[in-house]
Structures are given as C-alpha cells and as structure tokens.
Amino acid sequence: MKLACHRFGSVVKNTPTISRYATTWSSVVEAFNGQQRRVDLCKEDVGLFGVPELSSPAGFKVAQQKALRKTELLVATACSNPPGALTVETFDQLSDSLCKVADLADFVKVGHPDPAFRKAAEKACINIGTAVEKLNTNVDLCMSLKKLLENKEVLETLDPDTRKVAELLMFDFEISGVHLDESKRGKAVSLNVNLLDLNNEFLNGSLLPNRIEKKALPEHIRHLFSIDGKSIQIGSLHADSPNELVREAAYKIFLYPNSSLLHCLDDLLACRNELAKLVGYETFAHRALKRTMVETPETVMKFLELLTVKLSDRTAKDFNLMRDMKMKMNSRSTVSDLMNTFMQVFLSQEYSSLYSPYFSLGACMGGLNMLFSQLLGVSFQNEQPMAGEVWSEDVRKLAVFHETEGLLGYIYCDFFRRPDKPHQDCHFTIQGGRLKEDGEYQHPLVVLMLSLPPPTHSTPTLLTPGMMENLFHEMGHAMHSMLGRTRYQHVTGTRCSTDFAEVPSVLMEFFATDHQVVRKFARHYQTGQPLPKTLLSCLCESKRICGAADTQLQIFYAALDQVYHGKPQNRSTTDILKEMQEKFYGLPYVPNTAWQLRFSHLIGYGAKYYSYLMSRAIASMIWRQCFQKDPFNREMGERYRREMLAHGGIKEPMLMVQGCQVWGPHDFVSALCG
C-alpha cells in the first residue's frame, strides 16, 4: 500500500483602496483584495479542516489512534473475506483512513504557525508512516490481494478501475519487500522507518535559514534581511532583489555548507540504496522509476544528454546575453549571480514595478475563476471558515463548484508570508476524493501554500509576473485534485505517476503568459484600466528570453538527482555536484556553497526530478495542439478533463497523451526544443 502524502462578527468595510472600478469585479476578486472577515471566536472550535480532534495539538494522538484502530478492523476484513471487489474496496478504505491523518499532518508539520501543532503533526507522520511500512510487508494482507489477482474467474468480474487499483497495490507490496524472508522483511521495515526520520530531518534542515553576524555584512544592506538581535537570518536566495550585493551575499550565505545536514544527506542516500538493494533493485533510481513513463535511469540520462546537445548552442547564447546585460549595467559578472537566475532578476528590476499594479491577487484569482468557468464550467465561491478550521486568520477558503455537478471540493489558500512559514510554493492533498460506501462522493480538500507579501491598509497584495505564474502553476495542481473524480482515493487527482503529476500545473504556466488570457483579467487595482498592450507583448515575449538556459538548469538538477540515487560513489555530494554542474550546466561551482542542501525535492521527487522536464514536454504538446489558438475553447477543455484530469492515477500516462503515437527520448526533446 502506498501512503500518498504529496502540503468577530460582521464584514470589515475598510478594504484596501480599489477605487470605484472594484464594484464591477467579482466576489472572488473582493475576497482576495479585501480583508478577511474575522472568525467568531464565541462559536465552538471545529478543529483544523473540520476534524474535531484537532482543536488542540494533543488531538493528533487521538486522531492517529482512531485511524490505527480502524486499520486493525479493515486488515481483518481484508484477510477474512473471499477475493472480490470488496477486497480492493477494503484496501482503499484502509489507505483513506491512514492518509486522512498522515496527509493532513504532512501539511501541518510545515505550515502551522504553532510549534506545538507542528511537533504533534511530525510525530503523527512518523507513527502513521511506521504503521504503513509494516502493512506493506504484511504477508497475510498481501496474500488476500494475491488470491484475488490469481483467480482469473473472479478477476474477470471486476471493472477495469478495480483491477488496476489491485495491480497498483500489489506493486507497492513488491517494492516494499513482502517477498523476502521474515528477517529481511523486518530489515526493510527498519530501513523505511529510518528513512522517515532522515527525510524529515533533511526537509526541515533544507528550509532553515542560515545566520551570520550583522557586522559581517555592509551596513547599507543589513536592513534588507531579517535581523535577529546581533545576527542576520537569510532564508532564501533573494533572487528578485534589484541589489547585486544583496543577491551575491544571499547566495553565498544561504548556500553555505551545514556539516550535520551534509551527513544527513549522506545517510539518507545510503539508506535508500541499501533498501533498494535489499528488495531486489540495482539502485534506488531503478526502484523509483519502475512503472513510470521512462521505466529506467538509463532512459532518463539518455533523455537529459540528448536535450543538452540539442540546447547547447542556444544555452551558450543565453549565457552570453546575460553577461552582456551585466556589463551594460556596469555590474560584475559573478558566477553566483548568473546561477541566481540573473535574467529573472533583470526582468524583475525592469518590469515588476510596471506590472504589479495590474496583477493584484484579487485580479489574478478572478482571472483564474474566469478561465476555469469558460474552459471547464468550474467556478470558485469564497466561504467563511469556521472557528478553529484554519491555522491563520489570513487563510481563504474556496468552495469549487461545477455548473452541473455541484460541489467538487475545497481549496484552502494559505498565500501570505509569515514568520516560520517556508519560502516555497506547494500543493498539499489533505483529503482525497473517492466514492464512499454510502454512495456519496468524498470531496477532496487541498491546501495551496504560497509566499506572497500581505496586503497593506491601502494596497492589496500585488504580484510580480513570476508570482502570478507560480499561482497559476499551483492552481493547476489544485484543479487536478478537484477534477480527478476517481472511484478510489488511492489514485485520486495528483496521486498518479510522478512524471505526469506536473503536467496540469505546467500547462497552466502557458495560460499565465498567453496574451489572450492575461488581457482578460489584468486590471489596475486603482483605476481598473487594462494592462497596456506594450506591457502585455513584453510579458508574453519574456518567456522566450533565456529559455534555453532555464531548461538547462533544470537538466542539471535532474541529472544530479539521478547520480545521487545511482550507484554509490566514494566522494562527497558536493564533489558530485561540482562535476554535474560542469557537465550539464556549464557554469563553474561557487566555492564554499552546498546547493544540494536546499534541494528539498530530493525528498518527494527522489530519482524523479526529471519529471518537471517530461511534464513540460507533454504540456507543451497539449498547449500547441489544444489551446494555443483558443485558450477558452470549451470543447477542448472538456476533452482535456475527460481524457486526462478525470483519471487521476488510474490510467497509464502514455494512454492519456492522445495523438502522440510512440513517444521516446527524441520525441520529448523535440517537444521541449521545438
């Protein structure tokens, strides 16, 4: 079984200044450009996400105990009933019961502002994860599924979805080592439990800021960082800062090596390799890529090498363009600044102040609402959270409705920066959709977590073009969760092959930079005037600037991920990074930095980071064939939902990419570079 953890009264009237034009905008715009109604604290605390036990941190222990008790009953049911559809339904109930606690805790441990809640959620993740690993090597439980799959007569009575889920569940047993003898099964469980701790340690460490004494930085830039007493905290690369010295200082300090985290990464990679070898795979990469679109690490590396050759001339031109622009700005051409995506910095400096007034958060959310309404018949409605339902007053709750199907699910929008909140954009599944035993559909719940500047008293949150594109990307994940209306939660929404999971989100990036879409919603937050045509043209053309260098950077990340999870090498992860950066990116390594310690995708995407490139190739093909001429085409939108989004992980990704015939490394390269 795979545990699919993927993160006072009336309305306040003094909303930020949006002028008289605001009255013509939708309620969704008002919800995100105005101030949130305060929760009535006199009402009963319903608990996080409406889970009564979670009105306090101690409730996590209660919730996990309830889930584990239910697990015991469901395991007994699965093992005692004759093979049939009920076997698979029982497994899905088992998975759903555990995921409801683990997925929720997976978000709370990083997103809740209260350390007590975070700590309790972290313990719940470990405890539920340990239980799952034991279930994955439970021979009796596996045998109940095996009897089903080996009984041809019973198998023929199952519908295709039920049969597919049974096969996926059996695969999870196999890669967990259920076929091993008792001693080795115990070892596999022990390694998996150890990995839970190592994954958590590395993920937490990758998000922590680095500290430096105030006096170590020039006085005139200190105020641009977070100051804590006599030290300065640097928790990001500050890539969008117009100050060159700020960017360089942030790069070198934020990426400065942490010896304990380096040891953690070494232990994590060694543990993954030991587990893979124990259960019968050559490397962890071979285990991770089984049943993906590419199947083997060799195919991934061939794809990355072909892409590098194809892009080499264009990448070199992009680097030269960056250096020339630096020279024109009388700026030093430092490697750290080029590694810090200088092109995005330049565009940010040059254009963000011009674009941001037209990209208020409300306008962007209104644009998404308009797009989904025309394309898919789906709309958002702002709902007031109940007492205790959300973890911060600035979280917005959206109900997602289909024009004929009714309520689809809920999106919790945790968009604004706050202390101790990770500086990353994420989608978390809190509850997967599934058909319940009573015939009702269990609505999916998700959280979208961004790091946007909060609104001020007079101004709503204004987004840069990059922030707007990230918002569209994450909303692509959310809509995949909402529209993946599968019978089983084990395969709902984004619970699909990793190298397909990014397709809907990457596709949304194409909508975010298409002139036909942007001109529909980009309005000045004060005057209501549309984005000028010259700015609109520049925005759409900007995607082409240094695109090869950006793709090559992703190739480097993907190659590094593959090598880390390949055959063990008797050298440090930093030495490996130096070599792979030289081979796949071209810019030299910056001394005394350890970028790999900020590569948090090593946890959730271990040996699968190439998925972003593969998904971009597929999304590019879908965009060109289906939406480029008319991004609001309802017929194409319905087809896209019907052929792709609706299936979650129940349908093979290759079968969902219609009209592509046979796809191999060369085809993906052509789609990315064409």
Image: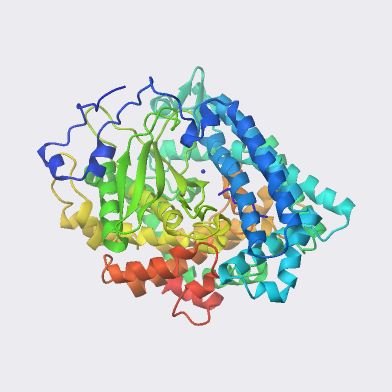
* Percent position of residue 203, x then y: 61, 41
Q: Nearer the viewer, residue 338 or 436?
A: 436
Q: Is residue 15 left or right of residue 82?
A: left
Q: Nearer the viewer, residue 296 or 76?
A: 76
* Percent position of residue 607, x then y: 64, 58
Q: Nearer the viewer, residue 207 or 238?
A: 207
* Percent position of residue 249, x then y: 48, 36
Q: Residue at x 57, y 71 (%)?
A: 160
Quadrant of the snapshot with the C terminus: bottom left
Instruction: For residue 360, say whether it is visible.
Output: no
- Residue farthest along the bottom direction in this orientation: 661
- Residue farthest along the left direction in this orientation: 20
Quarter of the rendering containing residue 115: top right
Q: Is residue 250 placed above or below 393 in the rendered structure?
A: below
Quadrant of the snapshot with the N terminus: bottom right
Quarter of the rendering containing residue 417: top left
In this rendering, the count of numbered labels is 0
Q: Nearer the viewer, residue 137 or 393?
A: 137
Q: Is residue 568 left or right of residue 556?
A: right
Q: Is residue 617 placed above or below 30 in the rendered structure?
A: below
Q: Residue at x 58, y 56 (%)?
A: 490
Q: Is residue 57 placed above or below 523 in the rendered structure?
A: above
* Percent position of residue 109, x then y: 57, 35
Q: Is residue 388 left or right of residue 566?
A: left
Instruction: For residue 598, say whether it is visible.
Output: yes
